[in-house]
Image (spheres, rainbow, N blue to C red):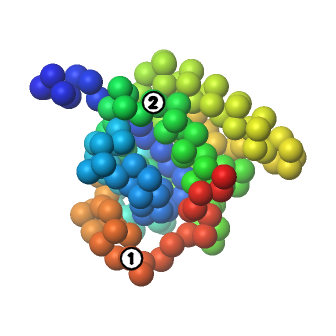
């Protein structure tokens, strides 16, 4: 581990199709613009313990209970975890269970996977703030789960930065800035 590695943290978010979540994040926090996001990788997490090293097809079958998610390596000296959590809420509909737009299934659920007690506390605080400011006025309820991070498996290479490589690729209409 280098000194630079010691100053990074990981954030893990699942908010529907991982293509859209990753694409919006990298559009607003481009790695080459030094806004705090250092790297992203899409993959699978949060499922059955015996569903190790799943494929995309297996995850989409709902047999694994894994969510499509994004692991974000970030520099907390540049961008705070609280800012990333709020940005995550801005980029999808956290009030729908197991779906985003036309994408339906447990792999499309909304989850914040925390990596430390501090991240858990921040995620809960930001969730309450966003609920009060953005969803209470419309009588909607955030259903995003806040869970400890567990085993992670990178998605197949063709999924990594998919919408950057395939600008005409399928985009979920809920993956946009909502405010």
> 3 above or below 159?
above
Q: Which mark is residue 80?
A: 2
Q: CA distance from mark 1 to mark 2?
A: 29 Å
- Residue 2 placement, left or right of 26: left
Which corner quadrant of the image does residue 168 belong to? bottom left
Say if residue 56 shows up in the picture.
yes
- Residue 100 in the image, given as x and y percentages of width and height: 62, 62
Which element type, helix, strand or loop, lies under badge 1? loop
> 137 above or below 168?
above
- Residue 174 in the image, given as x and y percentages of width and height: 62, 64
Q: How would you rate the neighbour count of disc 2 (Cα within 10 Å): few for under 14, some for 14-19, many for 20 or more?
A: some
| Residue at position x 50%, y 49% in the image | 14
Say if residue 53 shows up in the picture.
no
- Name the residue beneath numbered marker 1: 167
Which element type, helix, strand or loop, lies under badge 2? loop
> 99 above or below 33?
below
State if disc 2 and disc 1 touch (CB < 8 Å): no
Q: How would you rate the neighbour count of disc 1 (Cα within 10 Å): few for under 14, some for 14-19, many for 20 or more?
A: few
| Residue at position x 75%, y 44% in the image | 134
Most extreme residue toward the front is: 33
Which corner quadrant of the image does residue 19 belong to? bottom left
> 25 above or below 158?
above
- Residue 170 placement, left or right of 33: right
Most extreme residue toward the left is: 2
The quarter in which the N terminus is drawn is top left
Q: Earlier in the sequence, mark 1 or mark 2?
A: 2
Which corner quadrant of the image does residue 7 belong to? top left
- Residue 56 in the image, given as x and y percentages of width and height: 37, 64
Most extreme residue toward the bottom is: 168
- Residue 84 in the image, given as x and y percentages of width and height: 49, 39
| Residue at position x 57%, y 21% in the image | 121
Q: Which mark is residue 70?
A: none
């Amino acid at each position: 581990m280098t000194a630079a590695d010691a100053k990074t943290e990981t954030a893990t978010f699942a908010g529907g199709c991982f293509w859209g979540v990753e694409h919006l994040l990298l559009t607003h926090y481009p790695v080459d613009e030094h806004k705090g996001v250092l790297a992203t990788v899409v993959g699978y997490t949060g499922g059955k313990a015996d569903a190790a090293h799943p494929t995309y097809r297996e995850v989409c079958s709902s047999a694994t209970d894994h969510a499509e998610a994004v692991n974000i390596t970030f520099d907390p000296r540049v961008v705070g975890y609280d800012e990333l959590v709020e940005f995550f809420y801005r980029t999808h509909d956290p009030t729908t269970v197991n779906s985003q737009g036309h994408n339906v299934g447990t792999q499309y659920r909304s989850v914040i996977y925390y990596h430390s007690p501090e991240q858990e506390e921040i995620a809960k605080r930001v969730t309450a703030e966003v609920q009060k400011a953005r969803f209470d006025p419309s009588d909607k309820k955030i259903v995003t789960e806040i869970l400890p991070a567990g085993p992670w498996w990178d998605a197949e290479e063709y999924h990594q930065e998919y919408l950057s490589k395939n600008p005409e690729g399928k985009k979920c209409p809920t993956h946009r800035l909502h405010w």
